[in-house]
Image (cartoon, helix red, strand yellow):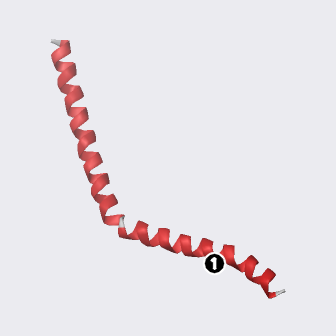
Amino acid sequence: MPRRGQSSVEPLLAFSAVFVLALCVCWWRFDSLMVWVNDASIAFQASTLFDDIAKRLGGS
């Protein structure tokens, strides 16, 4: 009987452990994510600048 109760609790413990671990990893990577978002916005601005230059060169 205790074996059956233990087997029903184990998946819940495993899920909560994985969830907490994922949360810690996400929190730890948050600064890196902000840097990535900043780099992505800079890259987007650069690509729009290159598109503008290409349109001007193509238009002339």
Locate residue 24 relative to residue 15 in the image: left or right.
Answer: left
Q: Quadrant of residue 16?
A: bottom right
Left or right: 27 with respect to 44? right
Image position, residue 49 (x, y; %): 20, 33
Answer above or below: position of 21 versus 32: below
| Mark 1 secondary-structure assignment | helix
Q: Could you tell me the amino acid type at mark 1?
A: Leu
To which residue does mark 1 refer?
A: 13
Residue visible at 80% across and 80% down in the picture: 4
In the picture, residue 42 is in which quadrant? Answer: top left
Q: Is residue 45 left or right of residue 26?
A: left
Quarter of the image where one finds residue 14 = bottom right
State the residue lying farthest toward the bottom. 2
The image shows a total of numbered marks equal to 1
Q: Residue at x 68, y 77 (%)?
A: 10
Q: Quadrant of the C terminus?
A: top left
What x and y, as percent, mark residue 55?
22, 20
Screen quadrant of the N terminus = bottom right
